Image: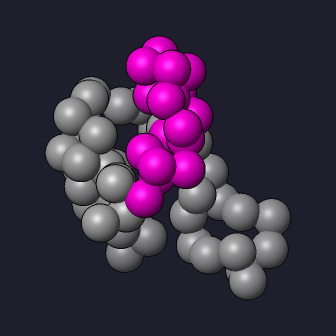
Amino acid sequence: MYAYEKFQKEVLNAVEKAAGEKLDESFFSVPPSPELGDLSCTVAFKIAKEKEKNPKEIAEHIAK
């Protein structure tokens, strides 16, 4: 397994644990610019929509 694939898998597992949901890789993408990071995730928007909550608060919880 390549280092970046291992990194993606570890991030997926950590976000699943924090979000309390099973996720697929479609929630993750490579940002358009390296200044924006190595990997981005849109799961906070999905959870916010389902639970009618603020996506920023959900993202902050997941980030902790």
Q: Quadrant of the N terminus?
A: bottom left
Q: State the residue at coordinates (62%, 75%).
A: 37
Image position of 57 with respect to 38: above or below: above
Q: State the residue at coordinates (24%, 48%).
A: 18
Q: Is residue 1 magenta?
A: no
Q: Position of residue 63 (x, y in %)?
A: 37, 63
Q: For this view, does 32 lie left or right of residue 14?
A: right
Q: For this view, does 7 lie left or right of residue 53?
A: left
Q: How is the image coloured?
A: one colour
Image position of 15 with respect to 6: above or below: above
* Residue 23 shows in the view: yes
Q: For this view, does 1 lie left or right of residue 49?
A: left
Considering every residue shown, the one lying at the far right of the view is 32
User: Observer-nearest residue: 11 or 57?
Assistant: 57
* Residue 6 shows in the view: no
Q: Position of residue 59 (x, y in %)?
A: 46, 52
User: Observer-nearest residue: 6 or 42?
Assistant: 42
Considering every residue shown, the one lying at the far top of the view is 50
Q: Is residue 58 magenta?
A: yes
Image position of 38 with respect to 42: above or below: below
Considering every residue shown, the one lying at the far bottom of the view is 35
Q: For this view, does 29 lie left or right of residue 50?
A: right
Q: State the residue at coordinates (65%, 60%).
A: 30
User: Observer-nearest residue: 40 or 9?
Assistant: 40
Q: Which residues are magenta?
A: 44-60
Q: State the residue at coordinates (49%, 29%).
A: 53
In which image quadrant can residue 33 be found? bottom right
